[in-house]
């Protein structure tokens, strides 16, 4: 890759940083060049996020229709699976699986809810009044 | 907060790849001036693996790098540098150990997860646990962070740093930290370069499992031809997107590290006085351009989701051409000796 071929396709880095690339200058020597992004890569990233957003939206609907507890929604939103969530909250997987059921979730005390809220970095109230929170988002 | 004003004068330089950058900056701090490509080459950072049974979000993992920590370990060993590495069960203890280092003016590398890394752009925050940064000070309860992906020094609170050091998930960092305890002035750079090249050639040519090195690239090429029929359009497109992400996502310097390696070969030619390495560098550059050609076609496939078998075949053909070319390069490089 030549220095002037280094792609500068604005993408997902929000101008916060640029990527270091290595390319050849006019004398055929390698130099480090900054790149704003490259469209195949930007699109690959967008593709990954599209899949995630689609999943999150599906779970949101499921929560609102009472099929799954809001923990399922925040789990998906934080790109977690059951094991990862259980790890972060510090509970066995089987318990977290139970908490995904709306009936079991309704019985949870504040201390456990707080642990979930901390993990998801949301307020306890948001988790408790999830119907309101999720209708807005 | 306890007494905290430590500020190590640290040579922060941005790099393509975090582990190269951290290593290169740490070495510079101790007076060893090596470029990022040099660190990458001596540390044998070039690799390829395709493990279809190991999946993240249901998509098989393709990787262009060795296990995290390898580059740092290899180059320090090859340059006769003494290091200390530790991991922790107790989170508080890990932060105390870090504070003690800072107090003594020791810049300290940490392995972290990026999901909770607050200064990262949100689009890049996945549960990826093999990022590296150097902690270079503490001020008003905040840690000063030299992250080679970022242009300048960043800050993290105690809580945020602790959280990324103890990220959960695949290969958790467990508070791992590492630092240099001593260097030896008489290190043998030439020999280290040769060792680094030999190791890379060995990794890319001789691992007897067909998932790694050149064989791994061939295997991926073979599998890719079957994707559209086997997986259906949508999943095949996701598999393709994943390959491009791993190839080009932050930290590869373009084309899955091939351009950094070509830069290394150029420097090595000069350092060792062996001009034939310049030819090798040119060949590696050509391979890098092929990888980019692959990324462009792959991008077209997953973007318009045409999913025609023809295009997957074209992409797979490029990969087998790449495997062929790379094999030639490593076979010739393997012959390298000190002159």
Image: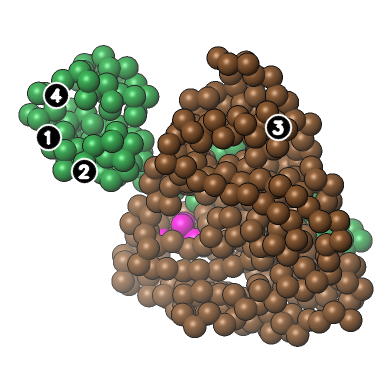
Residue beneath the point at 62% across and 78% down:
B202
Residue A108 marker: 4
The image's colouring method is: by chain
Give the class, few, some or many, for how many residues have Cα within 10 Å of label 1's Cα (few <14, many ≥20).
some
Quarter of the figure with the N terminus of chain A = bottom right
Q: Nearer the viewer, residue B54 or B110?
A: B110
Which mark is on residue B266? none
Q: Which chain is green?
A: A
Q: Which residue is mark 3?
A: B104
**Which structural element holds mark 1?**
loop
Question: Which part of the image, by quadrant, shows the C terminus of chain A?
Answer: top left
Mark nearer the N terminus (1 vs 2) = 2
The structure residue drawn at horizontal position 80% and vertical position 45%, both measured from the top left corner, is B30
- Which of pointers 2 and 4 lies earlier in the amino acid sequence? 2
Give the Cα separation between the discs numbered 3 and 4. 47 Å
Q: Are marks 3 and 4 in contact (CB under 8 Å)?
A: no
Chain B: drawing colour: brown
Q: What residue did someone put label 2 on?
A: A93
Chain containing mark 3: B
Q: Are marks 3 and 4 on the same chain?
A: no
Q: Is residue A6 magenta?
A: no
Q: Which residues are magenta?
A: B239-243
The crowd level at tag 2 (other Cα within 10 Å; few <14, some 14-19, many 20+) is some
Q: Is residue B215 above or below residue B25?
A: below
Which of labels 3 and 2 is toward the front? 3
Residue B286 at least partly seen: no
Residue A10 is situated, as x and y percent measured from the top left of the image, at 63, 40
Question: Mark 2: which secondary structure?
Answer: helix
Image point 41% across, 75% down: which residue? B223
């Amino acid at each position: 890759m030549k220095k002037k071929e280094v792609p500068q396709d604005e993408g997902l880095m929000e101008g916060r940083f640029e990527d270091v690339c290595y390319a050849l200058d006019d004398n055929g020597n390698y130099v480090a060049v900054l790149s704003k992004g490259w469209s195949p890569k930007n699109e690959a990233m967008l593709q990954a996020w599209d899949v995630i957003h689609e999943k999150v939206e599906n779970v949101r609907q499921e929560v609102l229709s009472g099929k799954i507890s809001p923990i399922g929604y925040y789990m998906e939103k934080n790109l977690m699976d059951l094991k990862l969530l259980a790890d972060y909250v510090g509970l066995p997987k089987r318990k977290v699986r139970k908490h995904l059921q709306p009936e079991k979730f309704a019985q949870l005390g504040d201390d456990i809810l707080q642990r979930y809220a901390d993990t998801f970095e949301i307020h306890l109230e948001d988790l408790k009044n999830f119907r309101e929170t999720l209708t807005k988002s | 907060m306890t007494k905290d004003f430590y500020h190590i004068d640290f040579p922060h330089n941005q790099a393509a790849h975090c582990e190269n950058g951290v290593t290169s900056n740490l070495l510079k701090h101790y007076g060893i001036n090596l470029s990022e490509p040099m660190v990458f080459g001596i540390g044998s950072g070039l690799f390829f693996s395709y493990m279809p049974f190991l999946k993240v979000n249901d998509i098989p993992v393709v990787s262009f790098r060795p296990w995290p920590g390898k580059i740092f370990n290899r180059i320090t060993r090859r340059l006769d540098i003494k290091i200390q590495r530790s991991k922790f069960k107790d989170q508080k203890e890990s932060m105390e150990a870090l504070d003690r280092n800072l107090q003594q003016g020791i810049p300290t590398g940490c392995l972290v997860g990026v999901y909770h890394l607050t200064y990262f752009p949100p689009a890049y925050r996945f549960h990826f646990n093999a990022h590296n940064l150097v902690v270079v000070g503490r001020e008003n309860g905040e840690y000063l962070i030299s992250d080679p992906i970022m242009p300048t020094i960043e800050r993290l609170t105690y809580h945020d740093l602790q959280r990324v050091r103890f990220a959960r998930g695949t290969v958790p960092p467990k508070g791992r930290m590492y630092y240099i305890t001593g260097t030896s002035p008489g290190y043998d750079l030439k020999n280290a370069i040769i060792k680094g090249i030999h190791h890379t050639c060995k990794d890319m040519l001789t691992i007897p499992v067909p998932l790694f090195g050149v064989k791994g690239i061939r295997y991926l090429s073979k599998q890719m031809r079957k994707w559209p029929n086997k997986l259906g359009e949508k999943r095949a497109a996701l598999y393709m997107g994943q390959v491009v992400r791993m190839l080009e996502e932050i930290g590869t310097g373009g084309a899955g590290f091939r351009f950094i390696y070509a830069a290394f070969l150029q420097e090595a030619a000069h350092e060792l006085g062996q001009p034939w390495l310049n030819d090798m560098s040119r060949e590696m550059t050509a391979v890098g351009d092929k990888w980019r050609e692959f990324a462009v076609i792959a991008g077209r496939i997953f973007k318009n989701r045409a999913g025609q078998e023809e295009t997957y075949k074209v992409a797979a053909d490029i990969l087998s051409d790449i495997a062929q070319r790379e094999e030639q390069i490593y076979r010739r490089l393997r012959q390298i000796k000190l002159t």
